[in-house]
Amino acid sequence: MHAIPDLTLNDGQRIPQLGYGTFQVPPEETAAAVRAALDAGYRHIDTAQLYHNERGVGEGVRDSGLARNDVYVTTKLSTGAHVPDDTRRAFDGSLEALGTDHVDLFLIHWPMVLSYGGDFVSTWRVLEEFKADGRARSIGVSNFRIVDLQRLLEETGTIPAVNQIEVNPYFSNDPLRAFGHEHGIITEAWSPLAQGAALGEPAVQQVAARRGQTASQVIMRWHIERGDIVFPKTMSPERMRENLDVFDFALEAEDLVALATIDRGPGGRTGADPDTFDYKPA
């Protein structure tokens, strides 16, 4: 199996291009899943405060026997913690749950333009504190639209290292990706397989048969060749290894044409839309 390539972020830090996503991994099963992913060869683990499994991620990293600096750990700010002092408390809670003195990447999970009137700028300035004191090696955002990124670029001094957004063959999200690329912001793709729906798509199956790969490998390779960071989620060690085994083949022009035919634009979303997503406290 070939080594996972690193990408260089706009702050000079390096990040593995393929990682293991823990969204919807039950907290009680997270440590074992993370350990299995690291055993399979992953070195980038993505979690979030909203997933309620940071403690399991930390346990899995420790149980792996790998040095902390050999595992890239990302987590994200809860939607209910955008007030600056709440942001600081939430970040401290993440470090405690993960059992580490730093995270490699810390993201604002959602811009929360409805609940907080778009006051993610003050939240971002707190993330700049975390980067300045070294407790977050890099900082970025998730689910930010072009208008949100423009505001950060205009009003703050730090360009996000990444924007983690939904991207899959049904929803290529190219205008947002292009804006990020233009400004040195790398795209991270969540829901990379369209929650599994794209695996049975005839065009994907045809490309897989042509290349002698699985449908999942074809889609993972599509993400990799587009230059995005991607982290599929699976609980199966076999599937974990399958999703890693994508660095010894390439997609041809005819494959890319075939995959482009299934792009549905915004209608291809499988998850929440930042235009309408809102957080309502219990």
Image (cartoon, rainbow, N blue to C red):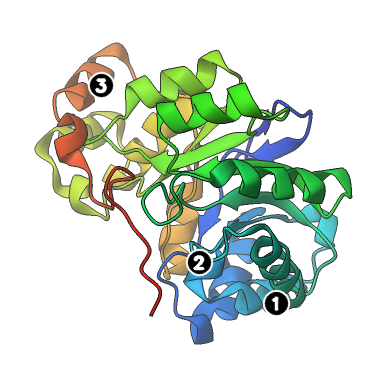
Quick one: 264 or 246, which is closer to the camera? 264
| Left or right placement of residue 97 versus residue 167 in this view | right
Q: Name the quarter where the C terminus is drawn.
A: bottom left
Q: Mark 3, mark 2: which one is toward the viewer?
A: 2
Position of residue 133 in the picture relative to residue 236 (left or right): right
Return the x and y of residue 280 as percentages of the image width and height: 36, 69
Which secondary structure lies at badge 1? helix
Q: How crowded is mark 1: few (under 14 residues within 10 Å), some or many (20 or more)?
A: some
Q: Position of residue 222 (x, y in %)?
A: 37, 30
Q: Are marks 1 and 3 in contact (CB under 8 Å)?
A: no
Residue position marked by numbered label 1 in the rendering: 97
The residue pinned by badge 2 equals 80
Instruction: Give the Cα distance between marks 3 and 2.
Output: 42 Å
Q: Residue 255 carries which label?
A: 3
Camera-nearest label, 1 or 2: 2
Q: Give whichever of discs 1 and 3 has the lower sequence position.
A: 1
Q: In this view, does 57 lie above or below 198?
A: below
Name the outermost residue toward the front: 117
Type of the residue with mark 2: Gly
Q: Position of residue 207 (x, y in %)?
A: 22, 30
The quadrant of the rendering that contains the N terminus is top right
